[in-house]
Image: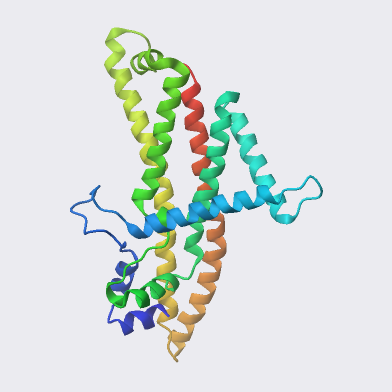
Amino acid sequence: MAAENAAEHGMTAGEYIVHHLTHLQSSKPGGVADLSVFNFDSLFFSIALGVLGCWLMWLAARKATSGVPGRFQAAVEILVEVVDQQAKGIVHNAESRKFVAPLALTIFLWIFLLNAMDLLPVDLLPAIWGQIHGDPHHAYLRVVPTADLSVAMGFSVTVLLICLYYNIKIKGLGGWVHELFTAPFGNHWALYPFNFAMQMIEFVAKTVSHGMRLFGNMYAGELIFLLIALMGGAWTLSATGIFLALGHIIAGTAWAIFHILIITLQAFVFMMLTLVYVGQAHDHH
């Protein structure tokens, strides 16, 4: 299907991949980081799936019973219990957990839903959008928001801001500023510049690695699905063509099954790191 679409629209395999990796944007970016550009596809799917996640949680709460729970209610209760236990083990402040535990649950569910978009056939939604747009060759659409660096870094920067809030709330503004200049090497005026530099490096490194880990894994998964799609699209009535078609089916099935683990694991890792970073914000040095 992929190669047929590419041939129909006059695209080579490389152009097909580039087309699928191009966002529906407000304008062409002027550089690597252009904050004036909006990726409308990432915004649309992020908001839509966020609303879907809220609706699922509301539905589970509305249908909750004190008797024997159904499978959906049981699954939601297990998820809530797991997240709550992780929050209790990392964030020891009971008052903070009233916000942090629901935050962790929201992060896990939202990122899981965003990641799960990678399991849809790669040409399905772009083909539909191409028909709506009227010009399939210039109708760009990416459906995996977490494969967009701006979305992944948006999540991680939000976590950073929450950590800064708890640093100030728990330690006080003066206490936090004092910690910035006295940890980790000690309270001595000669060490203040080194302590401050290390603290800034830590904040930046945690934030960048937090977002880049999610983005890198999901971007790689999206790219592999595109390569597998090209295998299937290149089939012909020849030994090589039939082999490619069989390889497409086997590789696509195997990667999709394995990717279920990846999308779940990435959501869980992002949630756990959020809890760890917020927990660190409560610790005094």
Name the image quarter holding residue 91.
Answer: top right
Pick out the residue farthest to the left. Answer: 30
Residue 38, horizontal then vertical, whole percent: 29, 54
Residue at the spot 61% in from the left edge and 30% down from the top edge: 89
Quarter of the picture holding the N terminus: bottom left
Q: Is residue 218 above or below residue 83?
A: below
Question: How many numbered discs?
Answer: 0
**Closest to the observer: 239 or 200?**
200
Residue 137, horizontal then vertical, whole percent: 28, 76
Residue at the spot 36% in from the left edge and 30% down from the top edge: 203
Residue 46, horizontal then vertical, whole percent: 43, 54
Q: Is residue 132 above or below residue 180?
A: below
Res. 219 visible in picture: no
Pick out the residue farthest to the top. Answer: 188
Res. 261 visible in picture: yes
Residue at the spot 61% in from the left edge and 49% down from the top edge: 58
Q: Is residue 162 above or below residue 177?
A: below
Pick out the residue farthest to the front. Answer: 62
Using residue 280 as the reference point, say whether residue 181 is left or right of it: left
Quarter of the picture holding the C terminus: top left
**Closest to the observer: 96 or 262?**
96
Residue at the spot 73% in from the left edge and 55% down from the top edge: 71
**Closest to the observer: 113 or 50?**
50
**How is the model colour-coded?**
rainbow
Q: Is residue 92 above or below residue 37?
A: above
Residue 79, horizontal then vertical, whole percent: 64, 45
Pick out the residue farthest to the bottom. Answer: 237
